[in-house]
Amino acid sequence: PQPIYDQEPSMVDDDDETPKDKEIDKLMTLISLSEKMLLCKKEEARIELNAEQADWKDDTDDESDDQELEAHYM
């Protein structure tokens, strides 16, 4: 399309920046999603670690129970 010369220069500049702004918005959205995914993975890893610690604690508690049973029946 032919440029409209009666527009103010700032309006023409805005038109030129629109694709750049859209690209920046897309990139910012991707960055935000990536950060959210990383935070979710970090949270999942923390939950798994807590579960492993709970399992370890359960195992440790079982060992003391086993020792008590052995002492009782020996």
Image (spheres, rainbow, N blue to C red):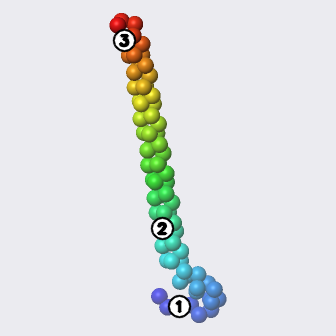
Which quadrant does the C terminus fall into?
top left
Question: Which of labels 2 and 3 is toward the front?
Answer: 3
Residue bearing mark 3 = 70
**Which callout, 2 or 3, points at the residue further toward the start of the chain?**
2
Q: Which mark is residue 26?
A: 2
Q: Quadrant of residue 54?
A: top left
Three-letter code, disc 1: Pro
CA separation in Å, label 1 and label 3: 93 Å
**Which callout, 1 or 3, points at the residue further toward the start of the chain?**
1
Question: Which of labels 1 and 3 is toward the front?
Answer: 3
CA separation in Å, label 2 and label 3: 65 Å
Three-letter code, disc 2: Lys
Farthest residue toward the bottom? 5
In percent of the image, x 45 and y 28: which residue is there? 57
Residue bearing mark 1 = 3
In percent of the image, x 62 and y 89: which residue is there? 9
In this view, the residue in front, 22 or 35, is 35
* 31 versus 16 height, above or below: above
